[in-house]
Image (cartoon, rainbow, N blue to C red):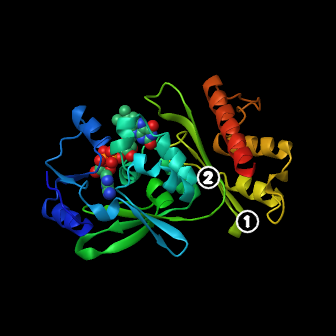
Amino acid sequence: MTLPATLDEAVAALAAMPAAVPVAGGTDLMASVNSGQLRPAALVGLGRISEIRGWQYQDGHALLGAGLTHARMGRPDFAALIPALAAAARAAGPPQIRNAGTLGGNIASAAPTGDALPVLAALEAVLIVAGPGGARREVPVSHLLAGMEMLRPGELIGFVRVPLLHAPQVFLKATGRTGPGRAVASVALVLDPARRGVRCAVGAIAPMPLRPLEAEEWVASLIDWDGERGSLVPEAVHAFGEYVAAACIPEQPPAADGTEQPLPPAVLHLRRTVAALARRALGRALS
Ligand SMILES: Cc1cc2nc3c(=O)[nH]c(=O)nc-3n(C[C@H](O)[C@H](O)[C@H](O)COP(=O)(O)OP(=O)(O)OC[C@H]3O[C@@H](n4cnc5c(N)ncnc54)[C@H](O)[C@@H]3O)c2cc1C
């Protein structure tokens, strides 16, 4: 395994060995190797690249290194900056996974159950991607997750730019039997007082996080941004949960003869879970 010391050295190593695969914490990659799904010809380890293991401030934003581990993001100093991402990091698997697994690996794996992903979608985060010859380009996380843009061969996620909103944000996750601590549904919700916005993303129920844009706009219009944010009536908080769930898991279209088609029980249960998570997330953010 090659162990470069800088991002550009890592990109150069990948260019020199096109069959090599980058590895950060190895929690996802080694699972694929161990199950025989992947046989990389060579590995480029990212664990010694100190420039991507911390964060820095940039014009009201934080530039997060892709090598930040879940354990690091879960600490109080990080939680004070980006509370929802810290909450997602604290919920990401057992301690040994959180100690090794990284932000960049979570994004590149793009698993529906990736806990950081709905938070990054709600924050409208942008990736700084490193390419050959010191090149850097920006890719919205949502574009990558939707398949609208891809990492080109030899490119690496270097940093993730997220806005510092200085307002409540919440991440909640429901787990089931899909694996150790993996989400069956999750909700990230952030308040953006400067833009008078509420942004919400639902994770794990689809290949990529879903944004219920109309529900966001509707609830943002009800909030008293200049006064008591917490004055929203409970009925509105409840309705927001239902609105989010209906946007993400719509009713079945009627049958050809016009009769209503109920959702299968498992889907109905998931819909109720999403509604409850969204309702609680909004309630906590406004309280
Ligand atoms: C038992 C278990 C439980 C888990 N539970 C959870 C959970 O609850 N929540 C959750 O979100 N995840 C969970 N995971 C998944 C995993 O830990 C995370 O997705 C983790 O963040 C992956 O990071 P990594 O550094 O280990 O990635 P790696 O395994 O090193 O890499 C994963 C993929 O990303 C690529 N990659 C890594 N870094 C970069 C980069 N900088 N640029 C481009 N490509 C890159 C690699 O080439 C590889 O394809 C779990 C995994 C296990 C094994």
- Residue 119 lies, in percent from the top left, at 54, 52
**Mark 2 packing: few (<14 Cα in 10 Å), some, or many (20+)?**
many
Asked if residue 104 is positioned above or below residue 12 in the image, the reply reads: above
Element at label 2: loop
User: How many angstroms separate mark 1 from mark 2 (CA)?
Assistant: 17 Å
Report x, y in % for residue 276.
Answer: 70, 36
SS for dot 1:
loop
How dense is the environment of label 1, judged by Cα within 10 Å: few (below 14), some, or many (20 and up)? some
Residue 211 numbered mark, or none: 2
Position of 226 with respect to 21 (left or right) is right
Amino acid on which the number 1 mark rests in the picture: Arg
Q: Nearer the viewer, residue 262 or 277?
A: 277
Which residue occupies 74% across, 45% down?
283
Q: Quadrant of residue 68?
A: bottom left
Write the residue at 56% across / 56% down. Answer: 80
| Residue linked to disc 1 | 196
Disc 2 residue type (three-letter): Arg
Q: Earlier in the sequence, mark 1 or mark 2?
A: 1
> Relative to the observer, which residue lies in front, 72 or 161?
72
Residue 152 visible, this angle: no
Quadrant of ligand 1 in image? top left
